[in-house]
Image (cartoon, rainbow, N blue to C red):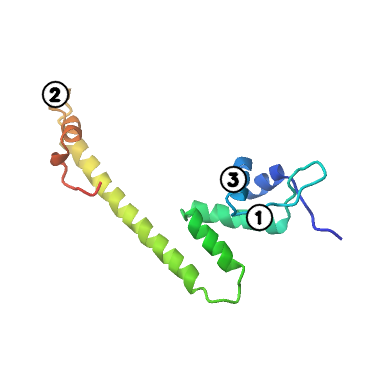
Amino acid sequence: MSARVISIGEAARQTGVKVPTIRFYEQIGLLPSPPRSDGNRRQFDEKDLSRLSFIRHARELGFEVGDIRELLALSEAPQSSCHEADSIAWRHLREVEARIAKLQALRGELQRMVDECGHGKVCECQVIQVLTDHARCRNETH
């Protein structure tokens, strides 16, 4: 009995990964080239779908392609230590926290600009003045 195979369109529908993205993942080696039918159409199986779902979820969480490549390689050695996977996740978490801090500083600066604006004429507008002169900003991290 052979494994159930599906088309690229059906793989896209089932995993939520767009067809061009699936082709891209194949091109960059995140997804092995699937076998082809006599009509040269890609044929995906359950293992491919699982891998695509893993990649999609990792991308949704913001992991870079290189990290996903490493995590996929680690997932193929299920009995090995998860230390490396933990390290990748911790590094990514630190990057996310740094971006959050930067966004919070940006939010604060934008809020201050809007709050300090007199809502009068453009020539007196705090928003325009701050955007014109970065020295008026209180935070250099945005």
Residue shown at 80% from the left, 58% from the top: 3
Marking on residue 24:
3
Q: CA distance from mark 2 to mark 1?
A: 60 Å
Residue 128 on image: x %, y %: 19, 30
Q: CA distance from mark 3 to mark 2?
A: 50 Å
* Mark in the foreground, 2 or 1: 1
User: Which badge, 3 or 2, is on the more N-terminal residue?
Assistant: 3
Going by the numbered disc 3, the residue's amino acid type is Phe
Residue shown at 24% from the left, 40% from the top: 110
* Mark in the foreground, 3 or 2: 3
Going by the numbered disc 1, the residue's amino acid type is Pro
Up/down of 88 relative to 131, above or below: below
Going by the numbered disc 2, the residue's amino acid type is Cys
Helix, strand or loop at label 2? It is: helix
Crowdedness near tag 1: few (<14), some (14–19) or many (≥20) residues, C-alpha within 10 Å: few
Helix, strand or loop at label 3? It is: helix
Residue 50 on image: x %, y %: 65, 58
Marking on residue 123:
2
What is the total number of numbered labels drawn onto the structure image? Answer: 3
Q: Quadrant of the N terminus?
A: bottom right
